[in-house]
Amino acid sequence: MGYPHKSHPKETVVLSQYFGDADARTFKGWTKRGGYEALAQSLKLDPVAVTDVVKESGLRGRGGAGFPTGLKWSFMPKEKKRPHYLCVNADESEPGTFKDREIMRWTPHALLEGTAIAAHAIRAEVAYIYIRGEFTEPWTIMERALAEANAADVFGDITIHLHRGAGAYICGEETALMNSIEGKRGNPRIKPPFPAAAGLFGLPTTINNVETLAAVPHIIKRGAAWYKALSLSNPKSTGTKLFSVCGHVQRPGNYEVTMGFPLKDLLYDMCGGPPPGRTFKACIPGGSSVPILTREETDACLLDYEGVVASGSMLGSGGVIVFDDSADMVYQIMRLARFYAHESCAQCTQCREGTAWTTKIMERILAGQGKPTDLDLLLDLSENMTGKTICVLSDSCAAPIVSGIKKFRGEFEAYLAGKRQPVMVG
Amino acid sequence: MTVQEDYQPVFTGRVLEELQTVLQRYPNKQAALLPALWLAQREHGWISDRIMAEVAEVLGLTPAYVKGVVTFYTMYHQHPVGKNFVQVCTTSPCNICGAEEVLKALLAQSGAGDAGATSPDGKWTIVEVECLGACGFATPVLVNDDFVENVTPDKVADLVRKYR
Ligand SMILES: Cc1cc2nc3c(=O)[nH]c(=O)nc-3n(C[C@H](O)[C@H](O)[C@H](O)COP(=O)(O)O)c2cc1C
Ligand code: SF4
Ligand code: FES
């Protein structure tokens, strides 16, 4: 809904319809708007039937990987011998991404409803919603909504708990999140076993992102065919998606569009383009973990899973970071590497050393003390950080570095050649 | 550095009752560790060695295990902090929107001086943090539990006055 701005006519408003409308936060306000009807409907259906509707809709995970949601649910054991769990990933910490926060702030019951439907579909009796520790306001709102919904007894046999994180980006990785709920350090686990076989407390578990689950009640209510028809480009990408746009645009915020929508229209029409007198230089379309696009690539990019890949990046979480011509790409890429160095859980050597070392090299370049071989060294290190570790945090650090050097090499070389004033002290 | 600590057991009375409620949410006691640490920090202000020992005791864990977990997460204070604990995001998206200037203004106007240090009057500890998940509202600043959006250097004076 363009929140905090008003809705743009080119948006397809489904998840964000009530952003900014505080009445929708209350149980009464939510049921007045048709809330919890999809849950009541689902609880009467066989879990397999619910899963089939979601499969048919084409919904894919909005947490970053884009895995088909119904298919994921169907991996849970057919025969239930032990308790099943659902984890809801509300750890949202990927730089550029701030959509789950808005879903929880404005439509907490949408998330609770989607959570209960998913729990029913995978036959879980308990669901934990893992909310990052810094989200103090969403936490309070979710807590109140849960208390209200519990008082109205809408969840049947399903119990939903909130669990507060304590500051660690890595806990957004699914198995790290499970360790964190178990009261452990948030280290990702080696897979297999996958969560559907041995997840939370060693039991069959499904994990989904907030936005994924918030879409589920709409799909149940309006049908798989309706959702599937929301697709402007590739039929493998369906539905609407919230894009959090930040950085150098006139109207940053959350915009909801149909899959396949042009990135260019999002940035110019909805976000108002660059600040006055500026031009766009680069864009990271899917949260900080995906490759950087040039302006030309940005202009041609269609926002769905396949479209962004065709443009040379990934849809990821849908966090769109925009840089105009005033941005120092070397400094910003160093900041991203520093983020990953700070957030590495340090289990894997390539990640622990690679994130720290690449950061250091870029700091030295920015201090005017780079060596001519530094760019090759950065690329070498990045290659070593890709595809070799327990989780993809390491790859995520390499993505902006490799694409940054490839596409903005001149900016790195200017520092190396002493043509640009150092901005850091060595 | 030795720190003066006025330690009193945290898990008694009402807080112990809260912990009992929390324990019911999980199939084992260990899983209540993060919530228990949150309760302890709320009551004591920070997570000292004695607090860790107490948490370990009530959850049937070892103090070493608890310390291992506490040190993994950035939001548990391992030292006392000022009355106002302020987190400023300076990651790229906020960075290009002027977050470092916001940080500088806060450090200067609060009297905290350096990031991570506590002001001499004990009122302010200001830290630089990575992405707060509100990048479209640059620069977000978390003052204790209050999430303040769209902070710019010219709004810092008001913010400092409000919390002083
Ligand atoms: C380092 C790292 C951080 C992640 N952070 C998040 C996150 O904050 N929120 C999220 O939903 N998924 C995050 N993910 C993806 C999750 O591991 C997982 O794929 C997702 O929660 C699954 O839900 P979905 O299928 O509904 O997208 C992260 C993955 C990695 C490797
Ligand atoms: S890749 Fe990095 S963050 Fe992921 S498990 Fe290895 S060390 Fe930890
Ligand atoms: S980068 Fe500052 S809140 Fe995300």
Image (spheres, coloured by chain):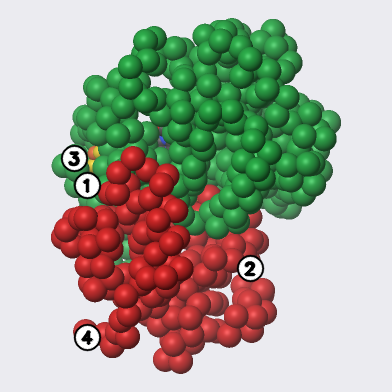
Q: Circle 3 — which element?
A: loop
- Residue at the (35%, 61%) spot, across then down: B37
Residue A399, visible in the rendered structure: no
- Work out how far the residue at label 3 is from the one at label 1, CA to CA, in angstroms: 6 Å
- Tell me the subunit letter for badge 1: A
- Tell me the subunit letter for badge 4: B
- Dot 4 amino acid type: Thr
The percent position of residue A59, horizontal first and vertical second, equals 57, 17
Marks 4 and 2 on same chain: yes
Q: Which residue is mark 4?
A: B2
- Pick the residue in front: A168 or A415: A168
Q: Which residue is mark 1?
A: A346
Q: Is residue A45 above or below residue A271?
A: above
Mark 2 C-beta closer than 8 Å to ligand 3: no
Marks 3 and 2 on same chain: no
- Tell me the subunit letter for badge 3: A
The nearer-to-camera label among 3 and 2 is 3
The nearer-to-camera label among 4 and 3 is 4
Mark 1 C-beta closer than 8 Å to ligand 2: yes
Q: Provide the letter of the chain coloured green.
A: A
Q: Earlier in the sequence, mark 4 or mark 2?
A: 4
Q: Are marks 4 and 3 in contact (CB under 8 Å)?
A: no
Instruction: Please identify which colour was used for chain B in the image.
Output: red
Mark 3 C-beta closer than 8 Å to ligand 2: yes
Q: Are marks 3 and 2 in contact (CB under 8 Å)?
A: no
- Residue at the (58%, 85%) spot, across then down: B164
Q: Ligand 1 appears in which quadrant?
A: top left
Marks 4 and 3 on same chain: no
Q: Circle 4 — which element?
A: loop
Q: Which residue is mark 3?
A: A348
Give the image quarter of residue B141: bottom right
